Image (cartoon, helix red, strand yellow):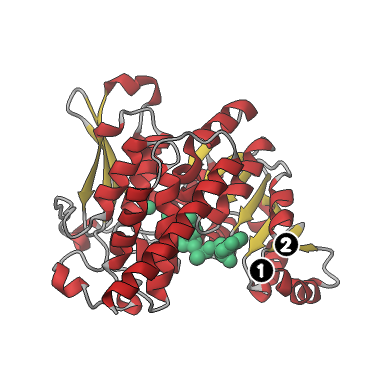
Amino acid sequence: MVARRTVSVFGATGSVGRSTLDVIAAHGGAEAWDVQVLTGGSNAALLAEQAKAVRARRAVIQNEQALPALREALSGTGIEAAAGDAALVDAAGERVDVCLSAIAGAAGLAPTLAAIRAGSTLALANKESMVCAGELVRREVAKAGTRILPVDSEHSAIFQVLEERQSDAIDRIILTASGGPFRTFSLEQMRTVTPENAIAHPQWSMGVAISLDSATMFNKGLELIEADQLFPVDSRKIEILVHPQSIIHSMVGYRDGSILAQLGTPDMRTPVAYALGWPKRVDAPVEHLDFVALSRLDFEAPDEIRFPALRIAREAMHAGGLAPCAMNGAKEVAAQAFLDGQIPFLEIAVVVECVMESIDHGSAAASLDDVIAADQGARTLAREVMQRRVRKFA
Ligand code: NAD
Ligand code: MG
């Protein structure tokens, strides 16, 4: 049992957030963890239930319309209730031993930055923070004298096997990818897939946005940029390897030919537990890996023709500055349009690429306002591109 640590969970009602509360429950619950803040988007009933279970001090809901329901559900418990974007940032500004950032999408950036500025150790699931504002986040981490513990499973794996004091001995980082539900599909087959097909991930149970990103492979593109921001390795040394079983979560290769890998069942509760307990390992309620039942592991090269997101992300990474932020903003809009039935699946990458061709590449982000402006600009452009293309094909 670890000493009682203060912890906050942003995005507690989501997939990673629920995994986090499972780890907290499995490892001593409110006896072992002093839970300060839990947040959710609009599910007040679930957020209140979670807050009561761990005896949190404060529950914050993003959607202000859900505040009365949250207040009602928490009445008599002594747990504070608040709502709105400013309340989220305010709650993140309260220092804790570890703040788990698991809001979905670029919306997670402002609370992430506030948590860093407060000096909390950041357990980071929200990859968009590193994609949209990696340099800014790293600057703020250095200024606050805190650190980032990656929760994205690949980055947790790399973090676990990367010998930081020997970074000059690193030959390559191998980022594994499941390949998503359309790994074996031809472009012709992908033309007619539905949102339902796209969010049915073969290995991982995740939120809707990241499941769709796994189908387009934009998720691996975001993770490539995230890895470049998190680890002291030349971006050209980061490779993507398709590994359909998702057992090897990523690997680091060294100059002497050694390759270190982290393996486990595909369950986010392992990387969450690693980050929550770090530098100790704590219990996680996950299945043990049975190698005999598994019997084999497969590997394939990634295909940038069928999955252009990989190439688009690599180009954005090399362009640097605000290019990855623009890519992510355009991708979030195009992905939502696909989920809403407005554009076909293959159009998602086309829209993002059109936006990337028309933006000014490479300017650096000095502040959160610069990042928000680049994100908003890309979203507006993506909507314009979609309107133009829909007219063209109508
Ligand atoms: P999810 O959609 O299941 O949950 C997202 C959480 O954020 C929910 O609590 C939701 O209510 C909240 N939220 C959504 N929009 C919000 C907004 N505008 N403001 C405040 N809160 C908002 O997502 P998830 O799958 O748990 O993913 C969360 C983050 O973790 C993403 O950045 C994702 O890329 C990353 N991640 C997820 C997994 C996974 O297995 N699910 C793995 C690695 C990384
Ligand atoms: Mg991942």
201 with respect to 187 (left or right): right
Which residue type carries mark 2? Ala
Residue 12 spot, x, y in % from top left: 60, 61
**Residue sitting at x 39%, y 70%:** 387
- The picture places residue 72, in percent across and down from the top left corner, at 80, 76
Q: Assess mark 2: CB under 8 A from ligand 1?
A: no
| Residue beneath disc 1 | 47
Q: Quadrant of the C terminus?
A: bottom left
Residue 187 position (above or below residue 312)? below
Mark 1 or mark 2, which has the lower sequence index? 1
Marks 2 and 1: in contact by CB < 8 Å?
yes
Image quadrant of residue 390? bottom left
Residue 102: quarter of image:
bottom right
Query: Badge 2: few (under 14), some or many (20 or more) residues near its Cα, within 10 Å?
Result: many
Q: Residue at x 34, y 57 (%)?
A: 352
Horizontal side, residue 98 vs residue 294: left or right: right
For residue 107, which quarter of the picture?
bottom right
Pinpoint residue 22: horizontal percent, then vertical percent.
54, 62
Label 2: which residue? Answer: 59
- Looking at the picture, tell me which residue is in the foreground, 367 or 380: 380
Instruction: Pick the residue in front: 199 or 154.
Output: 199
